[in-house]
Amino acid sequence: MASASSQRPTQRPAPRQTRAASLLRRPKLWLLPTVMSALLALLLSLLYMGGILTPSQDLHRLPIAVVDADQGPPLPGQQQNLGAEITRSVTTARAGGSPVEWRTLSQSEAADELASGKVYGALEIPAGFTASVAALTTANATAHPTITVLTNPAKGSLGSSLASQITQNAAHQASLTIGKQLTASPATAQTGSTTRLLLADPVEVVTQAGHPLGAHSGLGLSAFYYTLLLVLAGFLGGNIINTGVDTALGYADNEIGPWHTRRPTVPISRTQTLLLKMVMSAGITVLSTTLVMVATIAILGMDASHIPLLWIYSYCASLAVGLGVQALNAAFGGIGQLVAMFVFIVLGLPSSGATIPLQAVPSFYRFLAIFEPMRQLSDGVRAILYFDARADAGLTRAWIMIAIGFALALLFGFGMTRYYDRKGLHRLTPQPA
């Protein structure tokens, strides 16, 4: 009969624990994290800072309206009245290489383009401008000649500021040109030095909002930050759903603090897994979109109109991002989150045109803006929040690009997963419970 000691199972010694110091001496362990971290730091720096450092130098065809309402006769010895002269000098300055696209419009046309976000500002020459300037050399002067600079804060504080600076400078140059004509006129030859000083710069420049915003619009930045919330809700929500589903199906470990679990692997194809994640994204985005609107509008009081339309648009915009994230994760696996971050965040922010006008960034960012999702989504949000949900303010284009985003996410995602499934490229070998 065997003794009790001989029946006991042999206890194997615990494996020796590896120390961090020994691992740090392995070059291969350092290689991938070092290269990836360095590339990320370099690319992020170049992309973000490269688009904001020189907006005035990069300015390219910033649209600004010129309104000439002056219908009076010209000054003696002149062929055109002063309104026509100012319009001609402004619109022909640096022809072909001007950083500004001057648009000669009527008052009603300028008001319409300000209200639809097609121009960043306007230079308005009032009716009777020539007559008020001519009266300065006589005893009949009753009012100071004025030129009005109209801003469009709905196009963003920086874009509106750039347009305001340009139009104010144009108005000031026009005043100096008129002053030279007045001081050279025989009618002012006998005037005193004080009068001649006033005549040298006779026009007062008045600045006012051409398309004013509410007090709770962040000086034209609420549309950008609201769009960023929609993109982040779709991006982060998509990644959370991706990780949660993989953990629940046993394809990823669940580690919280010191606790680690691994569920039994559920046998499921890549295509069915992607379908599950996309359906969950469609359902969960309803909640996240609603909470974004509750937080920004109901709690914080953001100025917003067309609430039902804003909710539908917000849901579709955020869902398009979420489906894109799921498709990229399904196609690229572990690096899918990094690829999605570049597509929706890294390249999207500097090319959105929401903080710095696309006309004031290098041409590379204007190229990105053709297809980058954040630019398309911000145009739609801006149209709903600031421009009365007008289709020609960017809303139509935004809806079209959202539809294209849906189609690309579905075609690319399911195309890649079906290809993997047909090739027998299964994610993991099922593990028993």
Image (cartoon, rainbow, N blue to C red):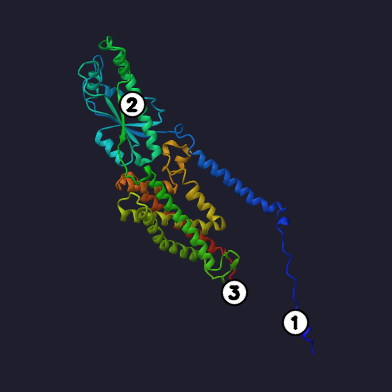
The secondary structure type at the circle numbered 3 is loop
The secondary structure type at the circle numbered 2 is helix
Dot label at residue 171: 2
Q: Residue 319: give x, y in percent of width and height.
A: 41, 57
The secondary structure type at the circle numbered 1 is loop
- Which residue type carries mark 2? Ala
**Quick check: 344 above or below 268?**
above
In terms of image quadrants, where is residue 308?
bottom left
Dot label at residue 129: none
Q: CA distance from mark 3 to mark 2?
A: 79 Å
The image quadrant where one finds the N terminus is bottom right
Q: Residue 342: give x, y in percent of width and height.
A: 51, 49
Q: CA distance from mark 2 to mark 1?
A: 99 Å
Q: Earlier in the sequence, mark 3 or mark 2?
A: 2
Residue under numbered circle 1: 8
Q: Residue at x 23, y 24 (%)?
A: 143
- Which residue type carries mark 3? Pro
Residue under numbered circle 3: 432
Asked whether residue 198 appears in the rendered view, the answer is: yes
- Which residue type carries mark 1? Arg
